[in-house]
Amino acid sequence: MAHTLARLFTVGAMAGAVAVAGIGAASAKTNIDLEVRPHTQHVGQWFSVQGSGRTDSAEWEKFCVQERYGNKGAWQTVWCGKTSDSTAQSASGYGWVRAGQRGTLELRGVLEGVQTAKGGRTWVDAESSPVSVSIVR
């Protein structure tokens, strides 16, 4: 049990932005910011999503955006930013998401650890709370 990492996530949401801070037994700290605009969109339209994050549990990391319709089901990665050196800067990204169908689209920011600067194996280090977008006709 002493070697098991337990993470406590504190989540705050304000005006379309989500921040997540995590604290683990090994002093791992995580911070993710996600901004989605607008929160209501028409089917077929594109809207902007941007975010950044930082963790001290991986040397190389990248910021990704994932989506799912409704509040159940598997998360699908929409896009990822460039791999960055977490000792020097935050991982960040800016991109577009298309409103594919009516209903509620949930988006979240994910920090992925990356094996090397050139790629390799990846793993999810942390994720933000979901941000909902209402998709209308």
Image (tube, helix red, strand yellow):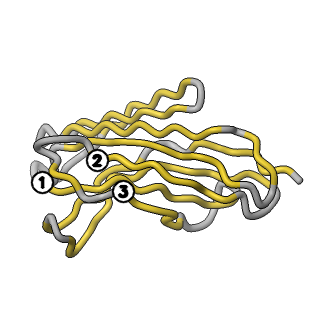
Residue carrying label 2: 91
Query: Where in the figure is residue 62, as x and y percent of width and height?
Result: 29, 56
Q: Residue 15 lies in what quarter of the image?
A: top right
The amino acid type found where label 3 is placed reads Gly
Q: Position of residue 71 (x, y in %)?
A: 65, 54
| Rendered location of residue 72, percent (x, y) | 64, 60
Q: Secondary structure at mark 2?
A: strand
Q: What is the distance, in whole Å, between disc 2 and disc 3 at their CAs? A: 7 Å
Residue at (57% x, 59% y) in the render:
67
Q: Residue at x 10, y 53 (%)?
A: 3
63 displayed left or right of 135: left
Above or below, comparing residue 5 to residue 123 in the picture = above
Nearer-N-terminus badge (3/1):
1
Cβ atoms at labels 3 and 1 below 8 Å apart:
no
Q: Nearer the viewer, mark 3 or mark 1?
A: 3
The residue that label 1 is drawn on is: 59
Q: Which residue is mark 3?
A: 81
Return the disc, 2 or 3, that comes first in the chain's sequence.
Answer: 3
Residue at 50%, 49% in the rendered image: 108
* Circle 1: residue type: Glu
SS state under label 1: loop
Q: Which mark is residue 111?
A: none
